[in-house]
Image (cartoon, rainbow, N blue to C red):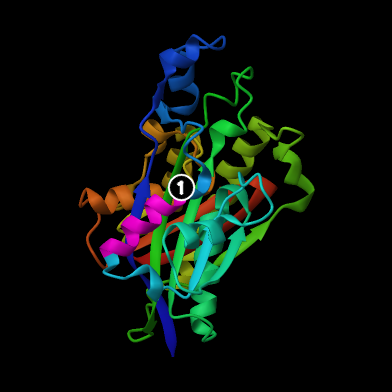
Amino acid sequence: MTGSRVVALGHYQPAKVLTNDDLAALVDTSDEWITSRVGIKTRHVGGPDEPVDEMAAHAGAKALAAAGLQPAEVDLVLVATSTAIDRSPSMSARVAARLGMGSPAVMDINVVCSGFTHALATADHAIRAGAAERVLVIGADKMADIADWTDRTTCVLLGDGAGAAVVVAEPDGDGRPGIGPVLWGSVPEMGNAVRIEGTPPRFAQEGQSVYRWATTQLPPIARKVCEKAGVAPEELGAVVLHQANLRIIEPVARKIGAVNAVIARDVVDSGNTSAASIPMALSKLVERGEVHSGAPVLLFGFGGNLSYAGQVIRCP
């Protein structure tokens, strides 16, 4: 049976870095206040000449180069984003045009912070159904454009960036596929706990509600993701959760029971980049050689809509 695997990764962040001290000049906050509450020290912020599709294309080009593929060889482009202001052309269509692709299918997926893991599952499903063979999956968000820079509880969280993965068809051989089965869902009655609403759109959230949900309800779901993949938590080589804030990442990772895994903590340097956070954090771990090729890695996204999606993949 045909399955899929991630063969290469890439990421991109704007050059401009916003420190906690920089934010203290804008709102009533401090480095100590931010660090103690969310664990973030810096975040990257894109300028007006760095739209979402440009960041996405940079990350996608790096992933394709690492995979040894030409853009024309891709037959499906999926971009997970919640910061695409224009309705059309979609971010995926714009990325395909920027990269000079042939005639791929293009689709945007908006599941906010868990967008990338939803998109990765969609790529796996498309390959298994015979609808695609080589897929470029990107998570990209420009959160600075939707930040309320007068709200110290939210503006300190957000950063910009993009991460990409190249997914190709591969026979399921040893019973442990390159991309394991997804476990996804949502809590519709609590969907307004994370919002991007209004004209112009602004990000807002019920921070305590999200924190309680994430730290109490998500660990058993993440363990079920491992169970579906046939991988025990202690076998994981890495855990890459949505980089929401350190006070969520560390207790959730601990409760999963991944005692031997490298835990991604890119949030400290990059802030919360929504759909970009998981592929960007994973790309950096691989680039630094912190996870060996073939190791099982848990990817688990959660957040906006109070949606979640996770799968275990084999590290490229």
Whether 247 is among the magenta residues is no
Where residue 228 appears, x then y in whole percent? 49, 72
Name the dominant secondary structure of the magenta segment. Answer: helix
Give whichever of 58, 143 is nearer the camera. Answer: 58
Type of amino acid at the residue the image marks with label 1: Glu
Q: Is mark 1 on a helix, strand or loop?
A: helix
- The residue carrying mark 1 is 54
The answer to whether any part of residue 257 appears in the image is no
Q: From the viewer's perspective, is 7 left or right of 191? A: left
What is the span of residues highlighted in magenta in the rendered image?
A: 56-66
Query: Visible in this render: residue 276?
Result: yes
What is the x, y in percent for residue 202?
A: 68, 32
Question: Which residue appears at 63% of the width and 57% of the height?
Answer: 89
Residue nearest the observer in this picture, 58 or 180: 58
Q: Where is residue 215 in the image (x, y as percent from the top left)?
A: 56, 42
Report the label total. Answer: 1
- The residue depicted at 41 percent of the width and 60 percent of the height is 99
- The percent position of residue 75, horizontal first and vertical second, equals 47, 75
Magenta-span inclusion, residue 62: yes
In the rendered image, the vertical position of residue 1 relative to residue 216, given as above or below: below
Residue ranking furthest to the bottom:
1
Quadrant for the N terminus, please: bottom left
Give the quadrant of residue 309.
Answer: bottom right
Quarter of the image that includes the C terminus: bottom left
For the residue carrying disc 1, how many other residues have a C-alpha within 10 Å: few (<14), some (14-19), or many (20+)?
some
Q: Is residue 115 left or right of residue 171?
A: right
Residue displayed at 65% across by 31% down: 208
Q: Residue at x 46, y 73 (%)?
A: 102
